[in-house]
């Protein structure tokens, strides 16, 4: 108390200076904000005056209504597309999994056995799915391998839905990770009638899984010779000019024209997965592959099952650069 009595006047002066400084700071800040608002109001008033003096430049009521409707439509389309693809489940590693490698092996065998059972029931051949079934991956590799397994599963489901003759081979390239999405390049070979292949392309475009078709070539089944090869439009054989759907965008297509209705098609496409949570879980690493294995997988000849040692038949495009053994992640 003696201290307060002794320095009472000094403390009062100090408090007065603090309040004065705070008031001065607030006054300057509020003045700046008020001046900015005043300038904005004046600018808008001048713009309105210009509309009154020149009515032709002012937006009409019909234009305002039309733009409002377009805005609402675009917002609705965005929400529809976002919800459509955001709800697609993807195979991921559960939180707190103690043995990631064993979980992946169990999931892989369950998925592959189910696909092979479906292929037998539907009489659709699955020659090579591009998944290495031997060895145990490291824990860091498991999230990326689960995404690749999910990609093969989704692709096979579209094959079953389209009822084509066979999925001859699948090659998975090196995935690329962006801040909000993942791109997985694929090179696949399928066989079937022209109508069933066209139905397969349409299903890829309408699928909830985003597949983007980049290039395609077709030859008659049973050999690459004897048929005139002609260029087709971006929609592909049996497709309207606009293509199979809004998601699958096709590059220039080569189709075989000739007698018979059995064709083999080689496609280069990408699967797009989006979602920041999924991207953060994926750590791309390298999976080692035995040197005695070709692109067809364990026990398969180079080039995949049903392929000659030199690669795919004449007339089918070679896999694009960057497509390697379907187990390499970087």
Image: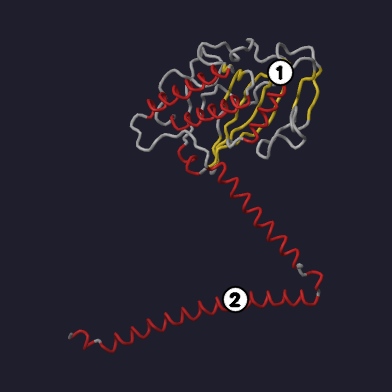
Q: Give the image quarter of residue 180.
A: top right
Reading the image, the residue beneath label 1 is 263
**Mark 1 or mark 2: whose residue is earlier in sequence:** 2
Q: Give the image quarter of residue 140.
A: top left
Residue at image location 56% in from the left, 25% down from the top: 156
Reading the image, the residue beneath label 2 is 37
Seen in the picture, residue 32 relative to 119 is either above or below; the reply is below
- In space, the residues marked 1 and 2 are separated at their CA atoms by 69 Å
Q: Is residue 322 visible?
A: no
- Left or right placement of residue 55 versus residue 285 in this view: right
Q: Which mark is residue 273?
A: none
Seen in the picture, residue 115 relative to 57 is either above or below; the reply is above
- Circle 2 crowding by C-alpha within 10 Å: few under 14, some 14–19, many from 20: few
SS category of the residue bearing label 1: strand
Query: Residue 310 location in percent, x, y?
Result: 65, 11
Q: Is residue 241 visible?
A: yes
């Amino acid at each position: 108390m003696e201290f307060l009595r002794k320095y009472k006047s000094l403390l009062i002066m100090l408090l007065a200076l603090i309040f004065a400084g705070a008031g001065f700071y607030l006054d300057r800040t509020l003045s700046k904000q008020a001046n900015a608002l005043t300038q904005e109001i004046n600018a808008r008033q001048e713009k309105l005056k210009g509309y009154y003096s020149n009515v032709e430049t002012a937006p009409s009521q019909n234009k305002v209504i039309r733009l409002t409707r377009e805005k609402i439509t675009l917002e609705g389309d965005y929400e529809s597309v976002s919800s459509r693809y955001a709800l697609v489940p993807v195979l991921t590693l559960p939180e707190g999994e103690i043995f990631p490698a064993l979980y992946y092996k169990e999931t892989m065998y369950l998925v592959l056995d189910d696909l092979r059972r479906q292929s037998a029931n539907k009489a659709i051949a699955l020659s090579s799915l591009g998944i290495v079934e031997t060895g145990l991956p490291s824990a860091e590799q498991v999230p990326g391998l689960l995404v690749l397994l999910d990609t093969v599963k989704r692709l096979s489901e579209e094959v079953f839905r389209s009822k084509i003759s066979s999925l001859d081979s699948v090659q998975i390239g090196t995935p690329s990770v962006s801040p909000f999405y993942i791109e997985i390049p694929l090179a696949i070979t399928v066989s079937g009638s022209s109508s069933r292949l066209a139905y397969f392309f349409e299903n890829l475009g309408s699928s909830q899984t985003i597949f983007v078709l980049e290039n395609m070539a077709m030859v008659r089944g049973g050999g690459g010779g004897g048929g005139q090869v002609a260029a087709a439009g971006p929609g592909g054989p049996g497709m309207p000019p606009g293509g199979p759907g809004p998601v699958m965008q096709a590059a220039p297509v080569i189709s075989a024209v000739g007698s018979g209705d059995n064709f083999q098609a080689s496609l280069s496409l990408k699967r797009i997965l989006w979602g920041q949570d999924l991207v953060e879980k994926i750590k791309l690493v390298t999976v080692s592959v035995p040197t005695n294995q070709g692109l067809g997988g364990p026990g398969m000849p180079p080039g995949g099952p049903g392929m000659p040692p030199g690669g795919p038949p004449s007339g089918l495009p070679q896999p694009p650069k960057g497509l390697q053994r379907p187990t390499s992640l970087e």
